[in-house]
Image: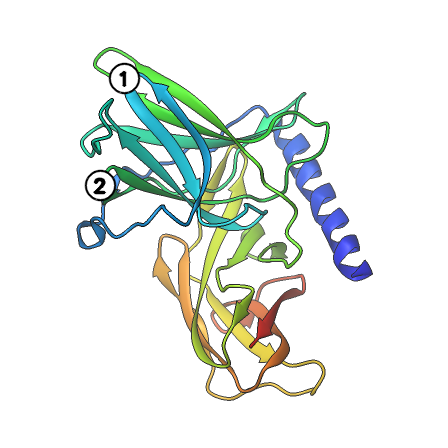
């Protein structure tokens, strides 16, 4: 626990130093455009999710949802648009930005363009590179952008992003791209056996966060109590847009860790220890 706390403090200090170096007056800009997932239409169920906000705005009923409490890691949020009668709105041009308001300064974070899931629901994928900090500004903000004929209206939702107890997004220095944020998308608990494992890589480049492709992510599941690993794992390969996919095998229940290295041309380029704890049921 002490090691996790120390790592967290060092990580927050790094983020603050990085932000101060670049001026901290920017918001991350997304170059992607809204897309539509035709195969996922009507597949998102909000009934078991947490509503972060719900309001009438620019003639629409706008609400924001999360599957679980938010922490500093990769997260998916769901924006729902309805008309005054509760009918879903699918054809409105809508986008968003995320901003970390720290009072005297602000900065952005990695995020992808909205995906139209149908039934008036839009999926937003993002990475919170740090948690909200007490008594330092408003914290993370989700700015919904509704484009009208002559102007764009902005609706802001406050996001309650807490410190993760189990790390899932870790920053590391590299010999190729300076600091890289490595987000492991596997849940905190899974069943024993083989599992696909996904990662998202982002680079902080002055005022923007960019998706990083072209790496190989070496994965090594390890069980500290038993001092053994497992066979039949597959390193995560680039799938485009900063996403990577591999395979991990957990041969028994208990506490495991996933040791990760970033590779390019077969050589290790990550400079820090990347370890993701996981509970196997």
Residue 228 image-quadrant placement? bottom right
- Name the spot of residue 270 as percent of width and height, x first: 60, 62
Camera-side residue of 119 and 248: 119
- Name the spot of residue 86 as percent of width and height, x first: 24, 30
Q: Is residue 226 left or right of residue 201?
A: right
Residue at left offset 41%, top offset 54%: 242
- In the rendered image, which residue does mark 1 sit on? 59
- Tell me the CA gap for discs 2 and 1: 18 Å
For marks 2 and 1, the one nearer the N-term is 1
For residue 116, above or below residue 38? above
Q: Is residue 21 left or right of residue 93?
A: right
- In the rendered image, which residue does mark 2 sit on? 119
Residue at left offset 22%, top offset 25%: 85
Q: Residues within 10 Å of mark 2 (few under 14, many from 20)?
A: some
- Report if the CB atoms under discs 2 and 1 are less than 8 Å apart: no
- Name the spot of residue 184 as percent of width and height, x first: 52, 61
**Quick one: which residue is furthest to the right in this view?**
2
For residue 173, above or below residue 155? below
The colour mode here is rainbow
Camera-side residue of 254 and 129: 254
Q: Residues within 10 Å of mark 1 (few under 14, many from 20)?
A: few
């Amino acid at each position: 626990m002490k090691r996790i706390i120390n790592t967290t403090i060092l990580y927050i200090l790094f983020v603050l130093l990085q932000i101060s170096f670049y001026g901290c007056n920017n918001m991350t800009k997304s170059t992607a455009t809204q897309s539509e997932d035709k195969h996922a239409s009507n597949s998102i169920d909000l009934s078991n999710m947490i509503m972060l906000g719900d309001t009438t705005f620019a003639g629409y009923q706008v609400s924001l949802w999360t599957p679980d409490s938010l922490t500093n890691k990769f997260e998916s949020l769901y924006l729902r648009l309805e008309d005054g009668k509760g009918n879903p709105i699918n054809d409105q041009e809508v986008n968003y930005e995320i901003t970390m308001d720290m009072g005297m300064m602000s900065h952005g974070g990695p995020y992808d363009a909205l995906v139209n899931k149908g039934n008036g629901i839009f999926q937003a994928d993002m990475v919170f590179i740090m948690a909200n900090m007490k008594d330092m500004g408003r914290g993370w903000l989700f700015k919904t952008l509704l484009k009208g004929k002559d102007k764009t209206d902005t609706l802001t939702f406050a996001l309650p992003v807490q410190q993760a107890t189990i790390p899932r997004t870790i920053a590391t220095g590299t010999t190729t791209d300076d600091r890289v944020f490595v987000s492991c998308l596997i849940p905190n608990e899974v069943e024993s056996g083989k599992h696909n494992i996904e990662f998202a890589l982002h680079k902080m480049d002055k005022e923007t966060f960019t998706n990083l492709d072209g790496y190989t992510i070496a994965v090594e599941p390890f069980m500290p109590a038993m001092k053994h690993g497992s066979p039949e794992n597959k390193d995560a390969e680039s799938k485009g847009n900063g996403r990577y996919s591999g395979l991990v095998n957990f041969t028994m229940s208990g506490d495991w860790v996933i040791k990760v290295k970033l590779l390019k041309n077969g050589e290790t380029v990550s400079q820090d220890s990347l370890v993701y704890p996981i509970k196997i049921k």
